[in-house]
Image: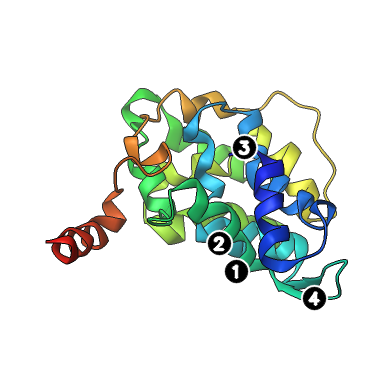
Amino acid sequence: MNIIKHCQLSVHRWGGVEADYIDIHTFIDQTKSVCPDMRHRFFHTVWAINYLVIPRFGYHFTNSSGKKVDIKDLCERDHLLIDYANKFIPTLGDFVDAIDDVLIPNYRQKLEQFHQKYITDPKISTLMLSPLSHTGKVKSLLLTHNSWFVNEVLPQLFDFKPIIDDFLINPSFLFNAMEFELWMDNGIAFPSSAKMLEKRLVTTRI
C-alpha cells in the first residue's frame, strides 16, 4: 500500500486531512529507498515505533480537526497491521532470522569497528545497539550499523550531521543476505513469532 492510501485510512479513522499524517507514514516507509521489495519492512515493527517513530514524532499529536491522535495506535492500525493483511505485526527478530549471516564475511569485526565512532554518545549508542537487546543476535546490528541508517535516520532523531566518509558497512550487506519470506509479502504466511496466533486462528475456524 502506498503512503497516500495509508494517509487516507488515517483520515477516515481519526479525521483531519492527509497532510496531518504524511510525515509519519513516510518515515515508516523510508526503508523503501534502500530495498524496493517487502524485505524493507523492518520499520514495520513495534521496535521501530518505540525506538524511532515516537522519539521522532512524540507519543501523540493534535490533528487539523482538533483531535488528539495516539502515535503508536496510528502506526499499528493504519500502517503495520494493514501491510500484513490485519493478521499480525512481526517482531524485529522475525526480520533478523531471515538474515543469513554466513553470506557476510567478518561482519562481527566490522560491526565492532563501526560502533566505535558512536560509543561516546550514550543515546545514539543505545539506539544503535537496541536490535541486539531485542533479538540477542549480533547480526541484528546490521539494521542500525550501516551508512544509510547513520546518514539518513540518525539526523532525523538527534542533533547529528551526516558523515562524509567511506563506511565499513552499507545497506547491501544486509539485504543481499536477507531471504525474502512469504510473511513479508502482505501477510501471505505467518512469521515465527505469530505461529501460535496462526494455530489459534485455524483452531477457531474448525
Residue named by callout 3: 31
Task: State the mark number for residue 73.
Answer: 1
Residue type beneath disc 2? Arg
For image coordinates 39% across by 57% down, the residue present is 88
Quadrant location, the N terminus: top right
Please state which of the two labelled residues, at mark 3 or mark 2, is closer to the viewer. Answer: 2
User: Given this view, does label 1 or label 4 mark the residue nearer the observer?
Assistant: 4
Q: Nearer the viewer, residue 30 or 9?
A: 9
Give the class, few, some or many, for how many residues have Cα within 10 Å of label 4's Cα (few <14, many ≥20): few
Residue in the picture at 30% in, 56% down: 193
Are the residues tagged 3 and 4 within 8 Å (C-beta)? Answer: no
* Residue type of the residue flagged with mark 4: Lys
The answer to which of 194 and 155 lies nearer the viewer is 194
CA distance separating discs 3 and 2: 19 Å
Q: Which mark is residue 67?
A: 4
Question: Mark 3 or mark 2, which has the lower sequence index?
Answer: 3
Q: Going from the N terminus, do you reach mark 2 or mark 4 first?
A: 4
Residue 187, image x and y in percent?
38, 44
Residue at mark 2: 77
Q: Nearer the viewer, residue 29 or 124?
A: 29
Q: Is residue 37 left or right of residue 149?
A: left
Of residue 187 and residue 193, the one placed in the foreground of this image is 187
Q: Secondary structure at mark 4?
A: loop
- Cα separation, mark 3 vs mark 1, equals 21 Å
Is the Cβ of the residue at disc 1 closer than 8 Å to that at disc 2?
Answer: yes
Query: Could you say where residue 86 lies in the image, as x and y percent from the top left?
Result: 43, 55
